[in-house]
Amino acid sequence: MADLFTHTDGESDSRATVRLDPSRRGDEVSPELYGKFGEHLYTPRNVTNVLEAQVLFNPTFGSWKFGDQQYGADGGNSELADPDAIDERIETYAERHGLPEAERLQQAYHDGTALWWFPYGNADDVRTSPDIGTADDRAQRFETGSTEGYDGLAQWCYLPVHRTTEFEGKVTLRAPEETTVRLAIHGLADDGSLGAVLAETDVTARDEYRTASFSLELPTVDRDDERLFGFSVTTRKTDGNVVVDRVCCYPDDHVATADPEIVDLLSEMNLSVLRWPGGNFVSGYHWEDGVGPIEERPTKPNPAWDALETNLFGTDEFVALCEAVGCEPMICLNAGSATPEDAARWVEYCNGSTDTEMGALRAEHGHPEPYDVAYWEVGNELYGSWQIGWTTPEGNADRFRRFKEAMEAVDESIDVFACGNRLTDWNEPLLEELEADDWLTDHVLVECHADPETDPVELFNAHSGFASQLREEYEAVAAECRAAGLEEVRQAITELQLFTRFDELDEESEADDGAVEDRENGERHLDRETLPTNKSITEVVFDATIIHECIRSGTVEMVTHSGVGNHGGGLRKSQGHVWADPCYYGQQLGSRLIGGTPIGVDVTCHTFSTETAWGTDTSEWFGELEPVTDEPAIDAMAVTDADEHDLAIVLVHRDAGADAIDVTVSGEPLAAVDGDEVTVDRLSAETMYERNTLEEPDRITPTTDSATVDEDSVTVSLPPCSMVRLTADREK
């Protein structure tokens, strides 16, 4: 491939040039470089209560798993048992989700009520205990005393009333004697207790479990900040005795149970691939738990995270989400606690005709046409002890061979991805099992630790300069593949994200070293609030520079960026509202390169280095990020004939230590721009650490204007730590 990027050191920190050279051309930009990843993480993160439109926490009354991230010998995290530690965790939940009172949830949990729920009405007359549900999992029994009001269960929940006031759902319940059960949405009193009933409906519980559909419509809600409500399941029956197995409640505008705002945002970002369901989660996930009628889907402890898995969002819901978004589904298989036969059945469920056993089961579930899922990844991070069923390099190669054979016996047309790792000898035995049309995956989850002594500019620039190091690492993997006779093996980054952690200094080190600088004196200062994270513009620059190197080198052909909801960079959902992190907009801007032919860019600009951080005791904090030396402050990628525009140019300002840079772009492709103007989309922030929030969801979003082309050149300004896209159509 032609050298698509050259750099000449410039004398000015405030000016730069980019010369376009269409005589140097690369391979067409693949849409698969702009994918996303979603995992069943904590509640509410990624899938549960985020991708899902479900408004209730723990709608299946499951037995909550309080994980403590202590890995057992066979992998996976263990579970808290200490009551005090559990109370602390519940208090954290309540604070994180803005719930009025942790003590009520703590007491209810210890008295036998499923987490997030609590007794309602005359609480002294309500008794709760666990029971057995329709899928042999946990259900919730409540018994009422001799009162005249409504008694039962309730929880606090956030409703998207800015969008709709109508809700629908299903409840599965029973009672020894025929009992009328009320489902209701309440307003809240000033003290957070459930107040007036705003909407209600009745269902009948009988001796055997039955599932009833219901709908609830709220009156008009005037204020946008009225998001927290109460939901109750109660009866007026004297000495009532009711068992509730599940109560699912969705806004009426849900998309096959997915959140419509999430669907719209993913649709608008030109998403190509969505990877699911894990992540660490998948190494303990059994897909057959998540298909079929919801009454038959068991709720289980989340195998990897601090949560439970309701199995309400399974294969059918995932494929429906991908269809609504317009992207390709990618399924990561359980290669930890599952077998090759399990994987083969999953492939057959998705792709088999109705003449096959699993294809017939899919049709029985309401989906007669095959899903034609093309991308299948065998395992997730199987090299790590945090993974259920982790293994050795030889063990991974053996598993890949057995899984691939079983899966391709069902559908030989699928693309199979092997679990790789560029940083160790993990790939060596795997190369003996790969074939020319296989994929080799890797994860780029860069964890850095920082403290008050860390220079924030050095920290940012270490991330923005990482792409060059990463390119060399993937080129080394490609060379190993070629040496093994595997020239056509494709590489994929199936998780990409930065993780920056802040570590407090102990009192002694602060006193001795004077670690905390005074911001008023103009000294660089780092704390939890000023840390550049994946929620900030830092992730935008990190992602864009890596994807640009993937395009230039051609060694990596797919990237599924982490994580789509409330986990790192992507989409956020809290208190019934959805908004986007800056990196969402960065991916949206960059995706306009798709389908284009890369052309050469010759950049003249100043450089930056980060050697100073590695000369101090804080060198260990930057982890796998190596020192950056003389990296160009400007990254540039240009393509012609993209799907959306005749010409698209993306510029990235990588040096947090510099001010705005005026960049002059020139070359023949600009000479014939239609109307002598280019559209300029600019994504920037005032600082490297600002983020979009529930209160200010649009603080960091792209702005659009235009710039005039003078003969064959145009000049635009790049603010510090920014991404700018120029697009234009050319005269025919």
Image: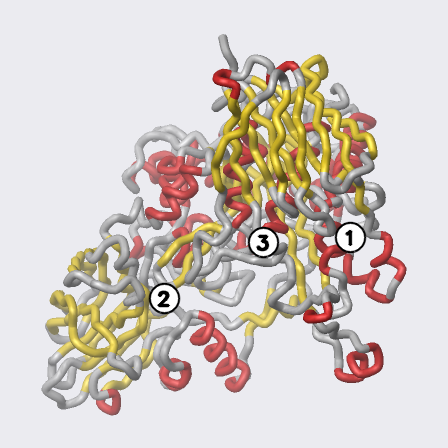
**Residue receiving disc 1:** 624
**Residue receiving disc 3:** 686
Front in this rendered view, residue 348 or 37? 37
**Residue receiving disc 2:** 57
Residue at x 15%, y 66% (from the top left corner) = 199
Front in this rendered view, residue 564 or 581? 581
Residue 690 placed where, x, y %?
56, 58
- Mark 3: give few (<14), some (14-19) or many (20+) Cα within 10 Å: few
Residue 209 placed where, x, y %?
21, 64
- Identity, as a three-letter code, of the amino acid under mark 1: Glu
Which is more foreground, mark 2 or mark 3?
Answer: 3
Q: Is residue 672 rendered to the left or right of residue 485? A: left
Q: For mark 1, give the secondary structure.
A: loop
Do tag 2 and tag 3 residues touch (Cβ < 8 Å)?
Answer: no
Q: Is residue 456 above or below residue 346?
A: below
Residue 332 placed where, x, y %?
54, 43
Residue 8 placed where, x, y %?
82, 30
